[in-house]
Image: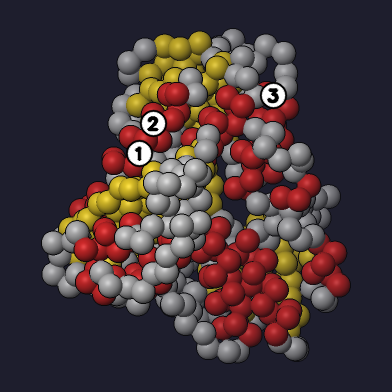
Amino acid sequence: MYKRQIVGTNHAGIAAANTLLDNFEDQEVVMIDRNNNLSYLGCGTALWVGRQIDSYENLFYTKREDFEAKGAKISMETTVDRIDYDKKEVHCIDKNGEAFVESYDKLILATGSVPISPKVPGRDLKNIHFLKRFQDGQAVDQLLSTEGINKVAVIGAGYIGVEIAEAAKRRGKDVLLFDAMERSLPSYYDKWFTDDMDAILQEHEIELHFGELALEYKGADKVESIVTDKGEYGVDLVINAIGFLPNNELGKEYLELFKNGAYLVDRHQQTSDPDVYAVGDCATIYSNALQDTTYIALATNAVRSGIVAGYNVGGVGLESTGVQGSNGISIFGLHMVSTGLSVEAAAKNGIKVKYTDFEDLQRPGFMKENATVKIRIVYEEDSRRVVGAQLSSTEDISAVIHMFSLAIEEQVTIDKLKLLDIFFLPHFNQPYNYITMAALGAE
């Protein structure tokens, strides 16, 4: 009987556990997590807090009993104190303070990420929160229902920051959105797209403070104001959404790390120790757009990496096909999706690209239900392979990004898209489809 240890039971760890339990015999699977719940879909926090869904219960897509029924051994509310990689031992402390040791043949680290905490004065005041775990969402949700919580400051205008800003506004709060960058969502979209997002946020009376750096929180017991390099603002609640760092605490002194501290893994999710695998937000991933190892913290990547590690640990060699970092966001009815590299991201990574833009109605002008669609296709200057795409509309254009994701993975050139067979029906699109028109406009 082979003993497989999985430390961490969110998306990546769950995917690894399910793969092992569903496909292999003679595997004793041990799952350890310091939380009291598993499988929380954090991407639904803003929907719940903003009352766009009725409750949080369905944000948990599996439970402890499901794995125990398959034969797994699970230790929740258990802290891994340290790992002895030479002896292959995981040293644990349970919720009662009792210490115990679990041995392993193969180990999967699925420890995720931790929120970036700005080391500024006043950061320990009450009513300053992060958004990561279910408990964090609970705390913010309860505060938004508390009398006297009227002004909310959100620090960070990435995905989580923009989403929770919308949620707080939907709860009737005055919302101030801060970011050191000059616009929202700079990691995934070029300015042509984020200008529309910034306009939507302002239209819904979210006060934008871009190009401002938080320097201090003030208050006697609870936070009462935030000080930036441009001013001081009275607030009742601060939500930090600056970003995340890989949680490498258990292996940073032993395993080889990427430049940002993530565990460096190969295409099998194997670390520098052949008996240790790392998956999800604590590990690197291969980008087909960059054609190189990178770090992209997304739940979808976590699931895929968990599946890959599960098969390899189980004894079936499976190599990751790589990822494109496909993602999407929907704020006040504006839908934006992207995959691969933006023009700005390509430049930062030293890749010379060109791009082609097109803007048109989703359907023919005679259709009553209609809206404008914007598309940008980014392609490498020399090879002409597609390396990125971005779309936005109040129409649901999300499925289009999957085609571009596959195009990047298969190194399709922009010229290949010019005469791509795309069907036409007025209910869905135009005879001169915006994908075709954008591709035809490429230099």
Q: In the figure, 313 relative to 138: above or below? A: below
Label 1 belongs to which residue?
194
Tell me whether the residue at label 2 lies in contact with that at label 1, contact meaning CB atoms closer than 8 angstroms: yes
Q: Residue at x 61, y 27 (%)?
A: 170
Can you tell which quarter of the image residue 302 is in? bottom right
Spatial distance from mark 3 to mark 2, Cα to Cα?
Answer: 26 Å
Q: In terms of secondary structure, where does tag 2 sit?
A: helix
| Amino acid type at mark 3 | Leu
Identify which residue is drawn at 43% across, 43% down: 371
Categorize mark 1 by other alpha carbons within 10 Å: few (<14), some (14-19), many (20+): some
Mark 2 and mark 1: Cα distance apart in space: 6 Å
- Tell me where residue 254 appears, x and y as whole percent: 47, 66
- Measured from the top left, where is residue 327 in percent x and y? 46, 55
Residue denoted by label 3 = 143
Q: Which residue is label 2 attached to? A: 198
Q: Is residue 314 above or below residue 69?
A: below
Regarding residue 86, the answer to whether it shows in the image is no
Foreground residue among 191 and 294? 191
Up/down of 195 relative to 262, above or below: above
Return the disc, 3 or 2, that comes first in the chain's sequence.
3
Q: In screen coordinates, is 308 left or right of 69? A: left
